Every structure is written in C-alpha cells, then in structure tokens.
Image (cartoon, grey):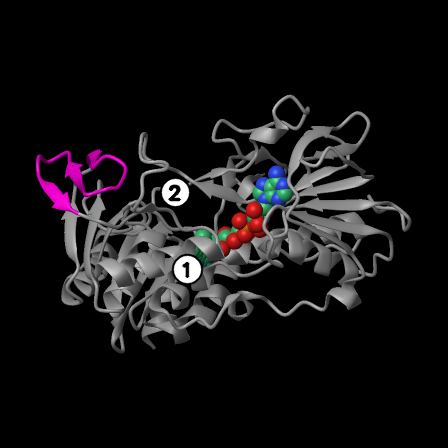
C-alpha cells in the first residue's frame, strides 16, 4: 500500500536541493498528481557547493552555473518562488504563506534547509558575511576582491573551502578555529595534520585553539578580538560557524522538533504529524543506532529525497552510504561511511594522497580519502560488505 493516492496534492516547502530532488524522484516513481514546489529565494533551485568554490574564486559565470539541469515543463509542477511559508496547520492540512494565502496539501514535504549561525552582535555589521545563498557568494567575492583580505571564523569544510578559494584569488587570509585543528570535530589527528599542512603551505594564517571574543568596529567591522588576547585586523569577515534549521515557523504546528531545531523523523523521513515528511539539512532522521541526526551533505539530501518519494509511491529505494566531499585548492577530501575524531585507526599513503580507516574494534566504519579518489568506490564496496580492518587494509594496499 502506498502513502500517496494518485490524485493527492503534494506540497514541497523549500525549493533547494532536497526539495527539487523530492519532486524529481516523485515524478520518476510515476506519481501523476498535482505538485507544488515553494521557495523563498527568487532563483530556481540551485546547487550550493560551487558557492564556496567557483563563485568565491570568481570562475562561476552567473547563477546558471549553479543550477542542476531540471526540466520544469516535464516535471509539470506549480513553482512558487519568492514566497515563504510562515505557518502550518497540520489539522486542516494547510500551509500559510507570507502573502496571506494558504496552500492545502494531502502530503507535505519539508525541505527548508538551514540558515547560517551568526556571532552575537555581528548581524548587520558591514563587512561581516555568511555564505548560504548565491547572493551571499557574490557579495563575499566582491568584498574580498576589493579588500584583498578575508578573515574566516570556523575551520569546518565551509570555512576551509572559503579560505582556500579566497587565497587562490591572491587575498591575504586568516582562519580562526576554536578546536586544535581544522575539521578536528570530524577527522582523526593524522588527517587533521594533513589538512593543516595544505593550508599552511598555501599561506593561510591559522589561529587555532582560539575563539572570537568580539567583533571590532562600529558600523563596519575593522577586526576581531580573539580569546587568546590577540587582535586581527579584518575588513572582511566570513562567519562559518554552522547552521540552524529553518524551522522556527513550525513552532506549535504539531510537527515535533529536536533540541537543535531539526524536524524529528523516523528512518524514512516521516515526521510526528500525519502526511508530513522532512528531508535535507532541516531533517533529523533516525539512524541505525536509534539516534536522530541531521546530516548536512549534498548526497544525503538527494538520498533522503529519493527515500521519501519511494515510501510515498510504494517503490522503495535502497539507502546509499553517507558520503561527502570537500574541495580545497587542488585537493579533494572524501568521506564515506561514519567517521569521527576518535575512530581513526590507520592512515596509509596512497599515491600522492592519504587514506584513513575508521573502525569500531575490528569493524570498518568509514574511510577518509585525501587525494585518493580512486579508492572511494572500493571503500563503498568494503563498507557495504561489512568488512573488517584487516580485509580493508589488504584490499587498499594490494
Ligand atoms: C557554500 C556551501 C558549500 C557546500 N559544499 C558542499 C560540498 O562540497 N559537499 C557536500 O556534500 N555538501 C556541501 N554543502 C551542503 C549542501 O549544499 C547541503 O547539504 C544541501 O544544500 C542541503 O539541501 P537542502 O535542500 O536541505 O537545503 P537548501 O539547499 O538550503 O534549500 C532549502 C531551501 O528552502 C528555502 N526555505 C527555507 N525556509 C523556507 C520557508 N519558510 N518557505 C519557503 N522556502 C524556505 C531556503 O531559502 C532554501 O532555498 C555546501 C553548502 C553550502 C552552503
């Protein structure tokens, strides 16, 4: 039995990666009924990964560069752009919009993504940027070009990519990270050291194990006061401090949220409200251990959209393994499976790159490949087969 009748009205809120993919997957599964895709941005759905890469490097020729090819005629949908959902009545099955209108639904897919976290007091200060939308990317690129410098706060993948891209344009770049190394919340120590070395070699000034105590300047930022007592001169600052799910408009709707604001979902994307599903950066799906987790990766958004469409149309799709990538300079870091700072058990040089095996006792949990692209397919196979560390080592080093 499917959760969707052929004539049901599907509304997807959030015209980003997960939203567009949900619509595409529904149509691929043969759903013929009416579909509305609603998004608050003016642009058609586009891919965000190039924002911290080609857009900041100045090599993306306009928003069309970012747009995944979608044939909107073929998708046969009602596309409402520049309109924001402001409220949800799960009893009457209606979404309220910012123009006072209401959209009835039989099935609702929440694909609202997330918004950048700001430092207290920094919002609205000229020269302080975040990076989530195409407009953010163009503004930041122009500001860095004009100032010839950038200070990045946050050494996760987004901050590191932005630092690398700005440096590639010749800008002076400082990066502030409160942990002991870049991506130290995710990678093991040897890969953290390798990523650190990449950025040091490129000429980035790293300020590690220190936070931001304050943003200097009045209307316009002039620098950052760091918690280690030093001061950085900085006319352009990027805050890359993570994101907050865009779900505040769901308060009181009956859709249960997790403490971090994500929509609480079961392992297939169902929320606590009948007929309501959630996908992408705003969704906290239950994993195999029973924990609810938000995964902010491109592949996960696409994968979850396909899963929900499969559940709705009675055409289940197999789940992919968690996968993410990050491009920094000419290097690519790829992560397959589950990794964490304390699960790195072995690191092997492979060609000019490195391969880190992550395990729980003997069971392979995940693999990190730095400039070892050709090993990623093999890593997937080993993880799917439930391989042990010895078997994996033998396969990689063969
Ligand atoms: C700069 C950048 C670089 C990235 N690079 C990588 C990478 O290299 N590799 C990787 O794996 N992942 C990367 N990611 C992550 C990846 O892009 C996200 O995981 C993905 O975009 C999530 O898709 P989503 O549809 O959930 O959210 P989004 O793409 O953010 O889409 C959500 C949409 O919903 C809209 N919306 C929100 N609230 C409302 C509302 N109330 N009403 C109507 N519309 C609303 C938003 O405006 C937005 O357009 C990157 C992200 C960023 C920002």
Q: Residue furthest front?
A: 219
Give the secondary structure at mark 1: helix
Check disc 1: other Cα within 10 Å, few if <14, some if 14-19, many if 20+. Answer: some
Check disc 2: other Cα within 10 Å, few if <14, some if 14-19, many if 20+. Answer: some
- Residue 394's spot in the image, x, y percent? 35, 70
Q: Where is mark 2, residue-wise?
A: 242
* Magenta-span inclusion, residue 248: no
Determine the image quadrant of residue 372.
Answer: bottom left
Give the secondary structure at mark 2: loop
Q: Which residues are magenta?
A: 212-233
Residue 348, placed above or below residue 351: above
| Viewport quadrant of the C terminus | bottom left
Q: Are marks 2 and 1 in contact (CB under 8 Å)?
A: no
- Residue 266's spot in the image, x, y percent? 63, 37
Q: Where is mark 1, residue-wise?
A: 138
Determine the image quadrant of residue 228.
Answer: top left
Residue 246 falls left or right of residue 317: left
Q: Residue furthest left?
A: 229
Q: Label 2 vs label 1: CA separation?
A: 20 Å
Residue 126 falls left or right of residue 78: left
Among numbered discs 2 and 1, the one appearing first in the sequence: 1
């Amino acid at each position: 039995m499917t959760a969707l009748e052929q004539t049901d009205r599907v509304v997807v809120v959030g015209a980003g990666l997960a939203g567009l993919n949900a619509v595409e997957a529904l149509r691929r599964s043969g759903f013929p009924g009416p579909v509305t895709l609603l998004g608050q941005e003016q642009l058609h759905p586009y891919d965000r990964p190039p924002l911290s890469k080609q857009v900041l490097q100045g090599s993306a020729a306009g928003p069309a560069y970012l747009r995944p090819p979608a044939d909107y005629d073929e998708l046969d949908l009602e596309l409402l752009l520049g309109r924001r959902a402001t409220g949800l009545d799960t009893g009457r099955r209606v979404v309220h919009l910012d123009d006072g209108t209401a959209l009835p639904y039989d099935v609702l897919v929440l694909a609202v993504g997330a918004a950048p976290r700001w430092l207290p007091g920094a919002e609205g200060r000229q020269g302080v940027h975040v990076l989530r939308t195409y407009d953010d990317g163009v503004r930041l690129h122009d500001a860095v070009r004009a100032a010839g410098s950038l200070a990045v706060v946050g050494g996760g993948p987004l901050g590191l990519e932005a630092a690398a891209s700005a440096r590639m344009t010749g800008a002076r770049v400082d990066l502030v990270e409160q942990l002991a190394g870049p991506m130290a919340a995710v990678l093991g120590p040897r890969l953290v050291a390798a990523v650190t070395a990449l950025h040091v070699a490129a000429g980035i000034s790293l300020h590690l194990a220190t936070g931001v105590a304050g943003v200097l300047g009045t209307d316009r930022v002039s620098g950052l006061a760091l918690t280690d007592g030093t001061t950085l001169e900085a006319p352009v600052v990027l805050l890359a401090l993570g994101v907050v799910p865009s779900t505040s408009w769901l308060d009181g709707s009956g859709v249960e949220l997790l403490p971090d604001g994500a929509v609480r979902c079961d392992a297939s994307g169902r929320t606590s409200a009948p007929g309501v599903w959630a996908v992408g950066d705003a969704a906290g799906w239950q994993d195999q251990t029973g924990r609810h987790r938000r995964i902010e990766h491109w592949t996960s958004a696409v994968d979850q959209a396909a899963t929900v469409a499969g559940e709705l149309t009675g055409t289940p799709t197999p789940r992919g393994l968690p996968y993410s990538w990050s491009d920094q300079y000419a290097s690519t870091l790829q992560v397959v499976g589950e990794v964490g700072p304390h699960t790195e058990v072995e690191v092997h040089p492979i060609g000019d790159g490195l391969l880190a095996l992550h395990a729980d006792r003997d069971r392979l949990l995940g693999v990190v490949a730095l400039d070892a692209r050709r090993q990623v397919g093999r890593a997937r196979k080993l993880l799917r087969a439930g391989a042990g560390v010895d078997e994996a080592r033998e396969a990689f080093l063969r």
